[in-house]
Amino acid sequence: MDNYEKLNRRLKKALINDSLEESLGELCTQEETALAQLLLKPEGAPAVIKVKKCDCGDEGPHSCEVACLFNAIERDENGNVIITGSCVGCGDCLDACSEQTLTGRKDSLAVLQLLKSKKEPVYAMIAPAFSGQFSEEVSSGKLRSAFKSMGFYGMIEVALFADILTLKEALEFDRLIQSDEDFVLTSCCCPMWLAMIKRFYKTLIPHVPPSVSPMVACGRTIKKIQPDAKTVFIGPCLAKKAEAREKDIADAVDYVLTFEETAELFELLKIEPKEMPEDEKDHSSGAGRIYARASGVSEAVHETLKRLRPDRKIPLSAMQADGVPACKRLLADLNEGGLRANFIEGMGCVGGCVGGPKSLIDKNVACDAVNLYAKGAEIKTPVDNPYVLELLHMLGYETVEALLDRDSDFSRIF
């Protein structure tokens, strides 16, 4: 366990025992003090951080530099490795770093401080990939109770907002695809996929419909309804930590916890989710729930489009790629004119979000759990979801089609 992780656990225990100030006063080295500041105020840091001096040597590019597809690792004038603002949190550098110089940013101490202060209502926003992560016995209702026991005001399934974005993407597809030559790239799910398009395949940007991710839509909606609220997204993904800090959407999410960080908090606070009472308030459809695995977005939009436009002459024809190398190959082929579908989906992790670097279980087991949870949904598509319509009306949308109105006062939410 590196010094950063050790210090993180130590300070969290101190905070729980009301001795944080005392523990901070005991820090005696410059390195400890710097790491403590990263843990207490992680907001300005990239998703991947450097936690100690790099000993890889000065000759040639470091393994982490070679591994980074997004050119986010550089060296300063003294040859020291630095992580730049272009880091998207893919995590490939962490696997490549044999010295454990790099690690994923931890937000758990800051979140624990926020919960302990009880100054504002804090909402847990759980990613669709949660199924099975904290044991197959942990239902959404038990998990909701566990978060409330931790100090959260409530837990909201981001799958409900995947429902809304599914509606929007289906409507965008219907508006944009008018011939066999037209195509769209799904825009609302994976930050690594979008980063690849924006940085390396800019000519494809016009084919990306304007939408935010379900995470951002969830955070913005909470803050629209309850302006003093704080929001914490919880999922298997490091890249969400980077996405939450992007300037044009930084208003939505205050902190991002991985499933690993969340499990550690449950352990420290002696909360056993599977022993919690049920608190059932599931509002998402099966379509929103399958966003967690590869091809889920395509399937959700396809089924929703059939419900919205059953007589459409040009059907949705999907192509998917999961994993950064596969996404890169697909985009390169598409950029060169290799069009073989009209709806293109990409996920940066193999298997989709269930294959994220901070998942607690094997991606195949997680995929089965997601599919089982989706199959058990009483509502199959967003079109049939009364909670979606109720929420849209609450936000001022007169009709579902109003989601495409870019001049609306509410267009910033979705």
Image: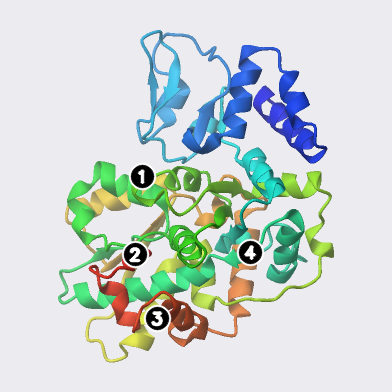
> Which is more toward the observer, 153 or 350?
153
Label 1, on which residue?
A: 247
The residue drawn where x is 34% and y is 64% is 319
Label 4, on which residue?
A: 155
Residue contact between numbered discs 2 and 4, judged by CB atoms under 8 Å: no
Lower position in the chain sequence, tag 3 or tag 1: 1
Farthest-out residue, bottom: 311
Answer with the quarter of the image where residue 271 lies: bottom right
Lower position in the chain sequence, tag 4 or tag 3: 4
The secondary element bearing badge 1 is classed as helix
- Residue type highlighted by circle 4: Met
How far apart marks 4 and 1 lie (CA) works out to 25 Å
Q: Position of residue 185 (x, y in %)?
A: 29, 61
What crowding class fits label 3: few (fewer than 14 Cα within 10 Å), some (14-19), or many (20 or more)?
A: many
The secondary element bearing badge 4 is classed as strand
- Residue type highlighted by circle 1: Lys
Label 3, on which residue?
A: 304
